[in-house]
Image: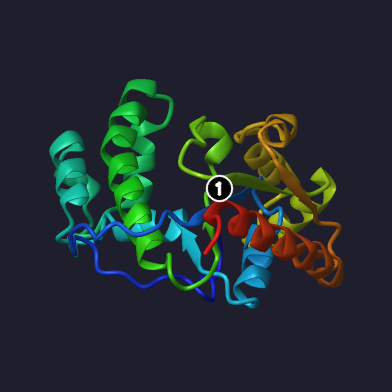
Amino acid sequence: MGPEHRGRIPGVLGAGPLKTITQPYRVALTGGIASGKTTVANLFAAKGIPLIDTDVIAREVVEPGQPALAAVVDAFGPTVLDAQGRLDRRRLRDIIFGDASARRRLESILHPAIRLEMDRQSQAAASLAPYQILVIPLLTEGGRRDHVDRVLVVDAPESLQIGRLMARDSVSRDQAEASLRAQAPRDARLAIADDVVLNTGRVEDLDVQVTALHRKYLALAAEKAGPG
């Protein structure tokens, strides 16, 4: 996702379940690579809306000492660790590349850990604002949305995504295009959207759209909460 979001909920992994409180109104924010998800998320954060970023959580759950890292080592062997005992992500990618069974095994370890911490952070933030944003870049690929009230897709022209990728990651056009092809197609993302933010490259335009959605989500959250 790039730079860490403002407004992200700090948490202590493994802190145990929180006392259940009123279920917060959850909006899942997703979109293709280099579509502007971080910019949109930070515009919501600037309005005081909590952000829960599954990319950040995915890194946290495999920090040294975390149960998920131990499970990954058990499944794939100690070679997935670097000299400092941290996860060697490149080595792990090499192992699962082209191996659907290995990828599913990894997902069966990481996805429950990510979901548990996402829910913990969501409950921790429930009293901070009427709604919250869950940044889930691979929501379309994961095929589940039962844990959110609404899906917001950040959409961008492919030409803008390619240009942003080339500038951000210092890659060639061919590499940028390959990265786009590796993700779910644009029409699949739009098919799961309740709302769409169109990113044409101007932050001012994004802010206008986010402001309108902010008002909409406040109203929807109030409607869900009911009287009182």
> Is disc 1 surrounded by few (<14), some (14 to 19) or many (20+) residues within 10 Å?
many
Q: Position of residue 14 (x, y in %)?
A: 19, 60
Image point (42%, 31%), residue name: 97
Quadrant of res 219: bottom right
Q: Position of residue 185 (x, y in %)?
A: 69, 31
Q: Position of residue 42 (x, y in %)?
A: 63, 71
Image color mode: rainbow
Q: Which of the two residues, 215 or 80, is positioned nearer the viewer here?
A: 215
Q: Which of the two residues, 205 or 166, is positioned nearer the viewer here?
A: 205
Image point (65%, 58%), residue name: 37
Q: Is residue 169 above or below residue 48?
A: above
Image point (79%, 70%), residue name: 207
- Looking at this view, name the residue that lies furthest to the front: 227
Q: Is residue 158 above or below residue 51?
A: above
Q: How many marks?
A: 1
Image point (43%, 70%), residue name: 127
Quadrant of res 214: bottom right
Indicate the amino acid at tag 1.
Pro
Q: Which residue is mark 1?
A: 137
In the image, 140: left or right of 189?
A: left
SS at mark 1 in the image:
loop
In the image, 28: left or right of 109?
A: right
Picture quarter with the N terminus = bottom right
Q: Which of the two residues, 163 or 225, is positioned nearer the viewer here?
A: 225
